[in-house]
Image (cartoon, grey):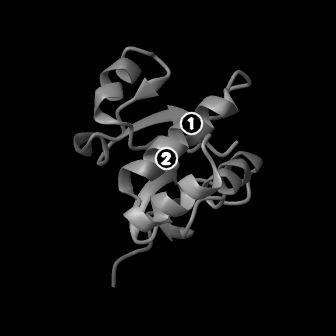
Amino acid sequence: MAEPHPQVVEPRHPLVEKVRALCLAYPEAAEVEAWGRPTFRAGKKVFLLVGSAMDRPYSIVFKPESDERLAYLGDPRFFIPAYWGPGGWLAIDIDSPSTDWTELAELIDTSYRQVALKRQLTALDSRHSEPLV
């Protein structure tokens, strides 16, 4: 039997709680612990995870729109996370006092929209025309 993955981030940390509140507001969103970190899913597909690596536990990994990815890479706050990066995913630290939570909510919204099913998007769009903040 394989050893469990070490815990990357404290799941009850206030930063994780803030991300959790944003993510779980989406239709059919669920939290699943995987790889020692909280992951947030639209149905069965991951749209966000907290803790890109052991040395960057207070970060989020998200899936940007492909045409926005290069612009994000020109911003030093964004980085390519291990394992997820080859699939087009990016990451950003969330533990800075200057963290812009409105921007993070927009990143979460975009990431959700990249993987959500049509019915989930219909449910989301019938509730809101703006990202959930």
Which residue: 44% across, 46% down?
111
Return the residue at label 2: 54
Q: Nearer the viewer, mark 2 or mark 1?
A: 1
Q: Secondary structure at mark 2?
A: loop
Which residue: 54% across, 63% down?
123
Q: Are marks 2 and 1 in contact (CB under 8 Å)?
A: no
Q: Residue flagged by tag 1: what amino acid is it?
A: Glu
Picture layout, residue 70 above or below residue 90: above
Q: Earlier in the sequence, mark 2 or mark 1?
A: 2
Q: Is residue 105 left or right of residue 40?
A: right
Hey, which quadrant is residue 117 in on the image?
A: bottom left
Spatial separation of the CA atoms under disc 2 and disc 1: 25 Å
Hey, which quadrant is residue 106 in on the image?
A: top right
Which residue: 77% across, 49% down?
14
Hey, which quadrant is residue 17 in on the image?
A: bottom right
Return the residue at label 1: 106
Which residue: 36% across, 18% down?
71
Picture layout, residue 55 above or below residue 40: above
Q: Residue flagged by tag 2: what amino acid is it?
A: Met
Give the x, y percent position of residue 113.
Answer: 43, 50
Q: Is residue 31 left or right of residue 12?
A: left
Q: Quadrant of the C terminus?
A: top right
- The reply to whether residue 37 is visible in this rendering is no
Give the x, y percent position of residue 55.
Answer: 50, 40
Residue closest to the eye, 108 or 116: 116
Q: Quadrant of the N terminus?
A: bottom left
Q: Residue furthest left?
A: 86
